[in-house]
Image (tube, grey):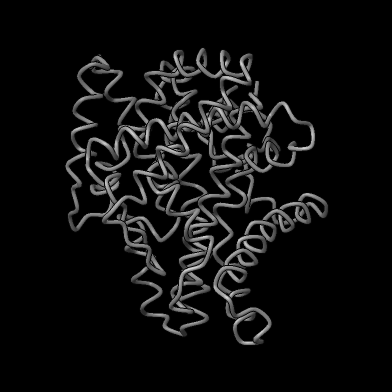
Amino acid sequence: MRMSWVDTAKGLSIILVVAMYSAYNTGEYTGQVGFLHYLIGFATPFRMPEFFLISGLFLSQVIARPWQRYADRRVLHYFYFYALWAAIMTVLKVGLFARAPVDMLQALALAVVEPYGVLWFIYMLGIFSVAVKLLWQLRVPHWVVVPIAAGLQMAHIDVASYVVTQFAGYFVFFYIGYAAAPVIFRFVDWVAHHVAVSIAGLLIWAFANGLLVFSPGYVLMPTETQMGLAALPPLHLLLAIVGALALCVGGALLSKLSFMNWLRWLGEHSLVVYVAFTIPMSIFRAAAMWSGILTETGSLSLAVLIVATASPVMLYLIIKRVGFGTFLFERPAWARIAENQTSKPAAVFATATLASNRS
């Protein structure tokens, strides 16, 4: 059973993620900032934390399953798409465009232990799922895990291993999504029935978040944002959690509007966009700049965002229509553990979404 507000919140999240890469990719080549950079700056505290938090919401429904079935749904599910698209991107960017076959092989080997580019999020979801399962089996209580994970996030650990760095930075949000799921569901259910209060709360949050992000000390650059007071470790953690909840509230309110169904659909198929948006993003940005049609950073960033989001969706719909290439966005039966061992029909496919399958 799917929940419309969850998918709508994921739709908001994937747009923010693509917007960040679109703005920074454009800014890298223009050397300037545009209006989209300000939106990305505003979302800096909560953009990725929300994605991780919402990915952990349904973990409690599968955490008690046997390891093989759990690993199929929560580990192999993510690693299949990571391995597939890491290989595709490496072959295209390094093997074909850069014409460096030796470097391509090295990059493929490195991608096994170090997440490749934008795909690091999918890689870490698999790692986080294993970590939570182990903690559950060891019966480590939430009140022990959450403070330690929060401490790791506030420590701003930055080491040579990208896996370690990202684990320290984001595990707390995934775990909170898992541990606090009942509270979050009750909270969102309440706000969905108190629209006026929810809108007022969102306005207050937006003002406070923007004030802290763009407080003295912030720097908005073409390829990154340095926050003001919001960068302080305790505040950063708090703003990340509150911002993640704010997007959940926004998802609950928007899911009530029938004309926003496209956003719910986008969230339901967020992995389709996530794994494939960087290729059309780079191609369109380069073509637009070469042609001279779009040169202003703000308008070019917005155009790149639209093309980068729409292109994977169009490819997905075409593939579904013709029935060829479904393995790009749907995990085939041979890439499963549970179905192979229980002799379920080989034609079964699992639709690729950033949230785990909930059946």
Front-most of residues 342 and 199: 199
Q: Position of residue 324 (x, y in %)?
A: 75, 56
Instruction: Classify 199 as above or below 351.
Output: above
Q: Position of residue 305 (x, y in %)?
A: 61, 61
How many labels, in total?
A: 0
Q: Which residue is pictured at 45% across the width and 75% down the height?
A: 32
Instruction: Classify 313 as above or below 98.
Output: above
**The N terminus, quarter of image:** top right
Q: Position of residue 201 (x, y in %)?
A: 51, 26
Horizontal side, residue 271 vs residue 157: left or right: right
Q: Which residue is pictured at 52% across the width and 80% down the height?
A: 96
Residue that sits furthest to the right in the current view: 321
Horizontal side, residue 110 vs residue 294: left or right: left
Q: Which residue is pictured at 27% across the width and 46% down the height?
A: 229
**The C terminus, quarter of image:** top right
The image quadrant that residue 334 belongs to is top right
The image quadrant that residue 285 belongs to is bottom right
Front-most of residues 152 and 312: 152
The image quadrant that residue 303 belongs to is bottom right
Horizontal side, residue 114 vs residue 336: left or right: left
Q: Position of residue 298 (x, y in %)?
A: 57, 68
Instruction: Classify 316 as above or below 174.
Output: below
Front-most of residues 3 and 340: 3
Horizontal side, residue 340 vs residue 181: left or right: right
